[in-house]
């Protein structure tokens, strides 16, 4: 199916977004990689590049055919214990923020901000449950909190009341947010 008339970037935040963010289910023209490369040593490397590649496309063709088989190994990076490398997911969205802002792509910028918030909330809980040192945990809580503070007004205009309440708790302290999440799960 040809998706002409629709921006290829629309697929980043649409119903198929989970499939559009990964590299493994696409065929690309070689010319797209003239200036764009996957970053070395990063986890979520496809997230750092897919949006750039889609942004360069005039057309995207999609097929519903199963043409790819994905095999997950027990010892793969994504199946290992939660590590600091997993925080790269957050930095993917921070990089996208800059990309969308520089190109005045407001719709994508706003969707990306919502994704950053969801990512921060998710990663915070994963960090809390990890066996990392308290120093490492606090380092990321601080990075996340400063980012959310800086973008507070924008976020308040685009998120639900429930998300705003969670955001406000997070800004008081990430531990208040974590406590609220655990209380909610117990109810």
Image (cartoon, grey):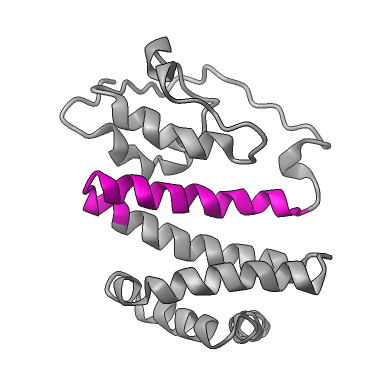
Expressed as whole percent of the image width and height from the top left, the position of residue 22 reads: 51, 34
Residue sticking out furthest to the top: 30
As displayed, is residue 127 above or below residue 157? above
Asked if one can make out residue 14 in the rendered structure from this viewpoint, the answer is no
Q: Which residue is found at the position 51% from the left and 20% from the top?
A: 66
Q: Which residue is found at the position 38% from the left and 60% from the top?
A: 113
Magenta residues, start to end: 82-109
Q: Is residue 65 left or right of residue 42?
A: left
Quadrant of image for the C terminus = bottom right
Q: Is residue 182 left or right of residue 102?
A: right
As displayed, is residue 11 above or below residue 174? above
Q: Which residue is found at the position 38% from the left and 12% from the top?
A: 31
Expressed as whole percent of the image width and height from the top left, the position of residue 138 reads: 69, 74
Q: Is residue 107 left or right of residue 132?
A: left
Q: Which residue is found at the position 69% from the left and 64% from the top?
A: 126
Predominant secondary structure, magenta span: helix
Asked if residue 108 is among those painted magenta in the image, a careful observer would answer yes
Asked if residue 149 is among those painted magenta in the image, a careful observer would answer no
As rendered, which of 185 and 159 lies closer to the eye? Answer: 159
Expressed as whole percent of the image width and height from the top left, the position of residue 130 reads: 78, 65
As rendered, which of 62 and 88 lies closer to the eye? Answer: 88
């Amino acid at each position: 199916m040809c998706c002409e008339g629709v921006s290829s970037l629309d697929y980043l935040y649409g119903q198929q977004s989970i499939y559009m963010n990964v590299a493994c289910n696409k065929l690309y023209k070689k010319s797209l990689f003239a200036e764009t490369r996957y970053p070395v040593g990063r986890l979520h490397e496809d997230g750092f590049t897919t949006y750039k590649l889609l942004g360069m496309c005039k057309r995207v063709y999609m097929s519903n055919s199963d043409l790819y088989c994905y095999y997950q190994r027990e010892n793969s990076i994504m199946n290992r214990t939660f590590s600091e490398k997993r925080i790269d997911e957050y930095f993917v969205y921070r990089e996208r923020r800059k990309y969308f802002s520089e190109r005045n792509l407001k719709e994508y910028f706003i969707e990306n901000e919502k994704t950053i918030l969801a990512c921060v909330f998710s990663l915070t809980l994963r960090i809390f449950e990890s066996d990392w040192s308290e120093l490492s945990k606090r380092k990321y809580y601080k990075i996340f909190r400063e980012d959310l503070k800086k973008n507070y007004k924008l976020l308040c205009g685009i998120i639900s009341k429930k998300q705003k309440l969670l955001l406000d708790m997070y800004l008081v302290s990430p531990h208040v947010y974590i406590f609220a999440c655990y209380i909610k799960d117990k109810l």
